[in-house]
Image (cartoon, rainbow, N blue to C red):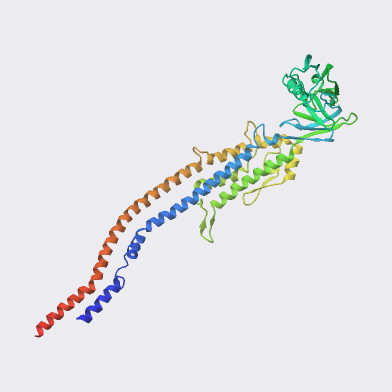
Amino acid sequence: MSTASTSTLSSVLSALGGSTGIDVTSAVDSILYADRAPERTWQAQQTALASQTTAIHQLNSDSSTLSDQLSLLQGIGSVLNSVSVASSDSSVVSATAADGTTIGNHTVVVTSLATTASWYSAEESSGSATLAAGSFQITSGGTTTTIQVGNGNNTLDQLATAINSQSLGVTASVVTDSNGARLSLVANSSGTAANFTISQASGLTFTQAQTGANAALTVDGVPISSASNTVVGALNGVTLNLASASPNETVNLTLSPDITDITSAVTNFVSAYNSVINDVSTDIAYNATTSTAGPLQADSAAQSFYSDLLAATNYNSGSGTLNTLTSLGINTNSDGTLSLDTSTLASALQSNPSGVAAFFQGTSDSGFAASLTNTLNTYTDPSDGAFTIDLQSISAENQDLNDQINTLETYLSSQQTLLTTQYNNADIAIQQLPQQIKNTDALLGLNQNSNNN
């Protein structure tokens, strides 16, 4: 009986986890792992939703960048209206032009530059040296003002402060070099009207360094007098910057579209468009060979977005010869991206700059730029755009999955406690089996001996 009982016990212990009893933790974990099968499915769905969310946010970001580039091609302030000015001799005169200035050619002859009136005093040992009493008069703008030397204005430094406090149309300063210090007075602006004189000087002597005079020039043969060497108004929308006088030289100014800036803006648009089309095409792609799909392969909004972007490049303004992207040198590649032929664009800008602007801007911002911007807004509008609605739906689905996971985890927590208690009790019972069998064997042995007697 003892041998049979020991063999039976070994079989039982082996089946329940070995001679040491039950591995409670492993047993409970195995059951809970099986019960978590739905949770693992839900978590995989959440991972997919996270990938979709990231992809949509990237498309929104790409679209925002594209919208920014399109905005530079719209409106009166558009880079398409920028004008550059080339000078045949910028050492004499250069120029800048406001956006939208009429292009064309102009001639300028600079006879003399505008000058700024200035005076200086005789040298003193320093700016702080005490001066002899006296006075002098400053006549500026038809008004004469007497400056007293003494009574608090005893040095060049003090005189400069006193003059500057009176708004006389001049600025006083003390100029110091190896020979000493001098009081310098300079008109606040150039030109004849700002000229001033110093007279009736006693105690100090003054020398006129320069007389204030207007610049003299001709623009397209019309004589112009300007108080400043920055001439505004001689040509509508153009600012002339006079650098030197050259009475016998005719300088040619050529106003033309700013091809460099415009090409840069169009290049940036093409680059931004390509970023969007590349990202969305990757997001919706399906690889049959590897059986892998992009995160938005089943997303109808992303599929529609891709189609609408491709369709947008077929825009035709319906007027003139520059009515398509291709006519401007912007071509569509087989993968949906765009490429820019800068030579074709430059040629279009040189021959018909208003036509290029009209294609992008249209009438009242109804051209290509506005059309594509409206398409983007259909998807990215923060209130009711297709991508906005997509993100809201994904967020709600993710929250539902979170709720299901939390509910299951709450249930499994109680199950873990229950199973642990049950298996611990079973393990204790198993651990007690050997002693119980011994006790049984002993009793059986005792009874057997009794029967034999």
Q: Is residue 197 above or below residue 174?
A: above
Give me the residue at 75% from left, 45% from top.
343
Relative placement, left or right, of 432 versus 32 is left
Q: Quadrant of residue 411?
A: bottom left
- Image quarter of the N terminus: bottom left
Q: Is residue 181 above or below residue 412?
A: above
Relative placement, left or right, of 283 versus 225 is left
Relative placement, left or right, of 448 versus 279 is left
Q: Nearer the viewer, residue 377 or 194?
A: 194
Give me the residue at 17% from left, 76% from top.
440
- Image quarter of the C terminus: bottom left
Of all residues, the one furthest to the bottom in this rendering is: 453
Of all residues, the one furthest to the right in this rendering is: 248
Q: Position of residue 282 (x, y in %)?
A: 56, 52
Q: How many marks on residues? A: 0
Q: Quadrant of residue 142?
A: top right
Q: Position of residue 174 (x, y in %)?
A: 78, 27
Residue 319 visible to an observer of this rendering: no
Give me the residue at 59% from left, 50% from top.
278
Q: Position of residue 410 (x, y in %)?
A: 33, 52
Q: Is residue 432 above or below residue 233?
A: below
